Image (tube, grey):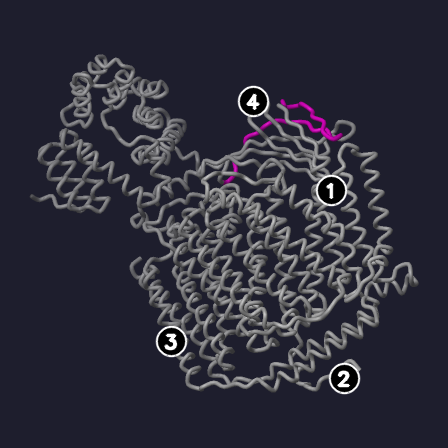
Amino acid sequence: MEAASYLGAMLFWVIAAVLTLGASLAVLLPLARQAEGEADTSHDLEVYRDQLTELDKDAARGLIAPSEAEQARAEIARRIIKLDAESGSKAKSASPLAPRLVGVVAVLAIPVLTWSIYTAIGSPDVPSQPLKARLEQKPADSSVDELIARAEAHLIANPSDGRGWDVLAPIYQRMGRADDAVTAYRNAIRLEGSTAARQSGLGEAIAGVSGGIVTSEASVAFEAALKLEPANPKARYFLGLALAQEGKVAEAAIAWRQLAESLPADSPWRSVAEQAVAQAEAPGAPANQAAGAPGPNQSDIDAAASMSSGDRTAMIEGMVATLDEKLRQNPRDPEGWLRLVRSYQVLGKTELAQEALGRAYEALGRDSEDGRKLTELAGSLGLKVTE
Amino acid sequence: MVEMGHFALVLALVLSLVQSLVPLYGAYKGDAKLMAVGGPVTVTGFAMIALSFAVLTLAYVQSDFSLVNVWENSHSLKPMIYKFTGTWGNHEGSMLLWVMILSFFGALVAAFGSNLPATLRANVLAVQGWIGTAFLLFILITSNPFTRLIPAPIEGKDLNPILQDIGLAVHPPLLYLGYVGFSVCFSFAVAALIEGRIDAAWARWVRPWTLAAWVFLTGGIAMGSYWAYYELGWGGFWFWDPVENASFMPWLAGTALLHSAIVMEKRSALKIWTLLLAILTFSLSLLGTFLVRSGVLTSVHAFASDPSRGVFILGILTVFIGGSLALFALRASSLTAGGIFHPISREGALVLNNLFLTTATATVLIGTLYPLVVEALFGEKISVGEPFFNLTFGPLMMPLLVLVPFGPLLAWKRGDVAAVAQRLMFAFGAALLVVLVTFLFIDGASVFAALGAGLATWLVLGALTDLALKAGIGNVAPKVALRRFLGLPRSVFGTALAHLGLGLTLLGIVGVLSFEKEAILVMKPGQVLEIASHRLRFEGLQPVRGPNFTEDQGRFSLLGPAGQPVAEIVSAKRFYPVRQMPTTEAGIKTLWLSQLYISLGDEANDGAVVVRVWWKPLVTLIWGGTLVMMAGGFVSLMDRRLRVGAPAKRKSADKKPSPVAT
C-alpha cells in the first residue's frame, strides 16, 4: 500500500512534468521556427475573384438581371483597385527585442504559473479511489463504511445469506440506520430462524424507525423474544419503556426494578434499568424522558445525510457535547462513557478523549467490569491507560 | 489519476492566458513568430482540457467518490450510460464541457485557418483565448469539479432522476456546440474591429461557423423540447420557460446572422450590421449561460444555484458584451460599407428577415427579463408566460413566415415581386385549398387551425417551388430539368430544406394545438377507453424493480378493429429512493406522424389508477421539421463554396489580378 502510493505520487509528478514540457514546447517551437511572410492582400483578391465567377454563374441562371450584374461587376472591380492601393502602404516596424522578450516570458510563464497555481489548489498526494478497488482492498485497510458497503454488495448478490444479514443488522442499528436494520433483522429471522437476540434487535430497530417510540409492532417483536428467552434484558427493558410511553410510569418502574434486581451487577442493562427507575420515580418525570439511552432520532440522521461534511461534523460535535453534559450530571452510565470516549477519538480530539476516559474511571471505578471495558476500548483506540 | 485532470486544467488556463496575449501582441507589432504561437497553443490547450474532461468522466464511470462532484451527482448502482452522461449532468461538469467545446472550436480555427490572413487568425485566436481564460478562471475559482473529499464516502447522492435519461447524452452537448459555436463568429467580429477593417474573406469564414453552430443549436433545442415532452409527463413541447427562452434567443439572432452573412458574403453588403449581429448572438449565448448557471431562474435546470457563481458570470457577461459593443461603437464608423441594392431584391428580403428576427429576439428578451427586473426593483413576483408570447411573438412571426417563400425567388440587387408572386401561384392556391378544407371539413370552429395549416402548406410548397423553378421543371425537357436539378448548388438545397422544415414544424405545432384530444379518468384493469377512434385497454399495474429505482408499470393494449391487441404501451411511475424523488415515464406510441401519450396519476383502490391519455395529431412533425432544418443547414455546409472556404494558399501564389469587368 505504502509503496504503491509512493509510486503513484511519483508517476503523477512525472506525467505533470511531461505535460508542462509539451505545453512549453507549443509556445517555444513557433518562436524558434522561421516565419514565412506573406502579403495580406492576396487573400482578399482571391475572394473578389471568386465573387466575380459566382456572379457570372448567377447571371447565367437568371438570379440577377444582366444590367445589375454589370453594376455588381463594376463594384467588385472598384474594391480590387482599392485593394492594390492599400497593399503598398502597409509597413512593418517592430523592434526585435520586445517580441523576443514576450516570447521568453510566455515560455517561462507556463511552468511557473501552472505549478504555483496547482500546488496552491490541488491535492497531488491524494490518490484516485475508484469504488471497485476500494471494495477489493484488504479488510484491514478498509474503513467501517467500506466494510459495510462490501457486505451490502455481497448481500445484493446473495440475498439468501442469512449469516450476512445477521452480522450487518446490529451494525446498521449502531450507525443509526434503523430502516436498514429492520430489513436486515427481518431477513436474518426469515433465513436463520427466530432467536431472542434477533427478535429484540428487530424490536429496537422498529422503535428506532419511529423515533424511539416503542410501537405495537415493536412490542410484538419484544414479546416474541421473551417467549424464546424469558429473561432477555433488552426485550424486558423496552417493554417497560413501552409502558412508560403509554403513561403507565408506575408499572414501568416496577418492571424495570424487577429487571434490575434479576440482573447481575456487571450487566450493562442493570445500570440502564436502574437509571430508568430513578428517572421514572423522579417527581414530574414526563413519560418520554424515561428513554434510557437517548440517541439521535431518525430525523436527525436524515438531516445528517443531506448535510455538507462541515455541517455534519458540527452536528456530530453538538451531539457529543450534549452527551458530555449529560454524563457530567449523571456519571453512572457506562455505555454513555464508552460512547463519549470513542466519539472524541473519532472526531480526532484525543485530548478530550483522554480527559473523558479519566472522568469515566473516576465515576465507574477502574477495576469494575465497566472499567475493564473502558480500558479495553482505550487500548483499541490507542489512548493512554496508565495514570 | 484524478489529480492529473486537475493539473491539466490549470495548465489549460495558463495556456489560454498565453493564447490571449501573445498572438494579439504579435498582430499589433506585426511579428510573424509571435502570431504563429497562437495555433499550437490553442491546439495544446484543447488537448489539456480534453484530458481533464476524460479524467473526470473516468472518475464518474469508476464511481470515485473522493471527488465532491462525483459524490454529489452519482451513485454506484446507476446504469453505466448515466454514470457517463452524469459527467455533464451537473454544474461543474457541464461548465467543463462548455469550455472543452470552446477550446475545440478554437483548435479547429487554428488547424484549418492556415489560409486566413495571419493577423486576422492571430486576433481571432486571441479573442477565443480571452473567453477561454474567463471561463477557466470561473471553473477553477467557483466551480472546480476536481475538489476532493477525504475520507471518501462509500456511496454517492445520485443524479437528479429527471436527468437519468438518454436525453442528457444528447441535449447539453448539442446545445453547447451551438452556443459556443457562435463564439467563433464573435471572435471573428471582435478581431475585425481590432484590426479596424473587414477582410473580404471575413464573411466566407464566418458563414460556415454560423451554419454549424446554428445546426447544433437547432438540434439541441429540439432535443430539449422532445425530452421535456416525454419526461415531464404532461406532453407539453414548449413552455416559454426562461431557460428555454435563453436558448431560443441565440437561435433567433443566429438565424438572422445566418441570413445577413449570405448578403455579406455574396454582395459585400451589410458588413457592419453582420458584425453587430455576430456580437449580439454570442452575447445572447452568454446571457443564456448566465441565466441558467447563476440560479437567477429556477427550473428543471436549477442544479446550479449559487449566488457567487452568478456574480462571476455576470462579470464575464459585462466585460465581454460591454467591451465588444464599446469596441464596435469606436470602430464601426471606420468600416466601409459595401454593395448597393434596391429595396425590392434578395438583399432587401434578407434585411426584412433580419428586422423581423431581431424584433422577435427583443420580444423574447423582454418577456424573459421583465419578471426578473420587476422582482429586483419592486420585490414582486410576476410571471410572463404563454399569453404574453402568444400575443407578441406569434403576430411577429406570421408576416415573416408568409414572406419566407418570396426570399429565395427574388433576384439579387433588384427584384420583381409581381413576377415572383406569379411563380408562387401554385403554392398559394394549394395553401388556400388547405385552409378551406380544414375550415369546412375538419374544424370550422378554429380559424387559427385553418390559417395555420394553410401557412404551413404555403411554406412547404414555397420551398419546393423554389427548387422546381431553379431546375426549370416545366420549362425545359424533363431530362434537362433533372440534370439542372442535380447540378444546383447545395446551398440552394440547403435553403429549400430549411424552409421546408420550418413549414413541417409549424404544421406539427398547429396540429397539436388545434386537434389534440385529452382524457382523464380512473381506469380499472380490463377497462377500455376510446380516444380519437383509438381503443385502449388497461391491463393492470405491476411493480418492477430497476437498478436504482422501483416503478409501478401500467400496461395498456392498443386494440385493433376486431378487439385484438395490436400493440402494448407501458407507462410508469418511478421512485428513486436515494433522492426520494418520483418521476413519470410516459407511455408513448407513435402512429404514423401522431402519438398516443399515456401518463399515470395516483393509484385508487382495488387496482384502479388515474390515467391521463392524450391523442397528439402530427406531433412528431414538430421535431421532424427541426431535423429537416438541420439537414438543410448541413447540406448548405457541404456546399463547394464553403468547403473551399477562404481561397486556398497555392492559388494565392498567382498574384496578378485577373482581367476584371471589361
Q: Is residue A42 magenta?
A: no
Check the picture and name the quadrant holding the N terminus of chain A: bottom left
- Label 4: which residue? B604
Distance of label 3 from label 1 (alpha carbons): 62 Å
Q: Are marks 2 and 4 in contact (CB under 8 Å)?
A: no
In the rendered structure, which amino acid carries the disc numbered 1? Answer: Leu
In the rendered structure, which amino acid carries the disc numbered 3? Answer: Leu
Main secondary structure along the magenta-highlighted residues: strand
Q: Is residue B544 magenta?
A: yes
**Tag 2, which secondary structure?**
loop
In the rendered structure, which amino acid carries the disc numbered 4? Answer: Ala
Q: Which mark is residue B659?
A: 2
- Residue B611's place in the image compared with B267, above or below, is above
Residue B435 percent location from the top left of the image: 81, 41
Pointer 3 indicates a residue of which chain? A
Distance of label 2 from label 4 (alpha carbons): 85 Å
Say which label, 2 or 4, has the lower sequence index.
4
Magenta segment, which residues?
B523-547
- Label 1: which residue? B593
